[in-house]
Structure formats: C-alpha cells, structure tokens
Image (spheres, grey):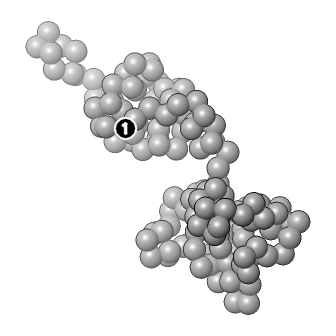
C-alpha cells in the first residue's frame, strides 16, 4: 500500500482466483510467489471461500466420471465426481467397480474416469468435448 492507501502492486487477481479453484492455498502461494495472507485477501475480495482440510483432500482425489451408452459407446453425461455420479444413479458403489475393471456395467451403463484437463477445456453445458481419442485416463 502506498501512503494514500492505494495498492501499487499489480496482482493478477482473476488468475489467482481461477488457480485457487483447482489447487490448494499453499500451491497458489507458491505458484504466484505471494504470501498466504495476500492470497487470502484476494480470495475474500472476490468472494471465494477458503476450503477446509477435508474439502481440499476430496478435491485433490476426485475426478470426472463419464456415463457411456454400452451399445453406441457415446457419452451420455459427465459428472464432476464419482460421488456425484453415485448420487444421481441411486447411490450405488458399483460405478467404481466398472471404472476399475471389476464389472462391465452399472445401472446399464459403462463408466469411465475422465481426464480433468478435458473437462476444463470442454463446454459441459452442451457436452461438447474435444476429440474423443484421449478422453479417458
């Protein structure tokens, strides 16, 4: 802050906020080279809540899941996480069995783990995904 109370440090606030949404507070501070309090102030100013430890852990281990028609192999829907897919289909735990190769289908569908970067580059409202060749992990 300058003597007049104005900030003279140009920070890429939008980039910081977007980065934090996919990473931890610690990773954000290291990536942008600013202290934790500065990053927290930027997040607060932009109305982005800080995540608790459990939420951070879930975010780090969650992955998008694709629901696939078994006859046509077309993607029907992409869920942001396995738990979201389970809730939408009746809270079954067999989706992960399909993803891990222990079952062929669950609730009549194939299921695949999606690469996170594909989801980030896709228009999920229209489910317009980039080329289908490298969608799965």
Q: Where 14 falls versus 63 (above or below)?
A: above
Residue 135 horizontal side relative to residue 6, left or right: right
Instruction: Please state which of residues 58 and 120 is positioned toward the viewer in this rendering.
Output: 58
Q: Which residue in the protein does label 1 denote? A: 48
Instruction: Please state which of residues 72 and 15 is positioned toward the viewer in this rendering.
Output: 72
| Residue 118 seen in this snapshot | no
Residue 60 horizontal side relative to residue 4, left or right: right
Tell me residue 58's x, y (percent).
Answer: 63, 42
Residue at image location 49% in from the left, 26% down from the top: 29
Residue at image location 45% in from the left, 76% down from the top: 126
Q: Quadrant of residue 136?
A: bottom right
- Residue lying at the far top of the rendered structure: 3
Tell me residue 119's x, y (percent).
Answer: 55, 62
Instruction: Please state which of residues 135 and 97 is positioned toward the viewer in this rendering.
Output: 97
Q: Quadrant of residue 125?
A: bottom left
Count of labels in the image: 1
Tell me residue 53's x, y (percent).
Answer: 58, 30
Q: Where 9 falls versus 89 (above or below)?
A: above
Tell me residue 36's x, y (percent).
Answer: 45, 20
Residue at image location 16% in from the left, 20% down from the top: 6
């Amino acid at each position: 802050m300058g003597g007049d109370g104005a900030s003279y440090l140009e920070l890429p606030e939008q980039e910081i906020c977007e980065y934090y949404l996919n990473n931890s507070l610690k990773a954000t501070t290291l990536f942008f080279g600013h202290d934790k309090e500065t990053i927290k102030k930027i997040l607060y100013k932009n109305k982005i809540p800080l995540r608790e430890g459990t939420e951070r852990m879930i975010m780090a281990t969650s992955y998008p899941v694709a629901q696939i028609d078994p006859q046509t192999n077309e993607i029907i829907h992409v869920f942001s996480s396995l738990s979201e897919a389970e809730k939408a289909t009746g809270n079954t735990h067999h989706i992960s069995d399909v993803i891990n190769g222990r079952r062929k289908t669950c609730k009549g569908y194939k299921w695949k783990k999606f690469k996170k970067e594909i989801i980030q580059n896709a228009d999920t409202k229209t489910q317009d995904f980039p080329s289908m060749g490298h969608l799965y992990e």
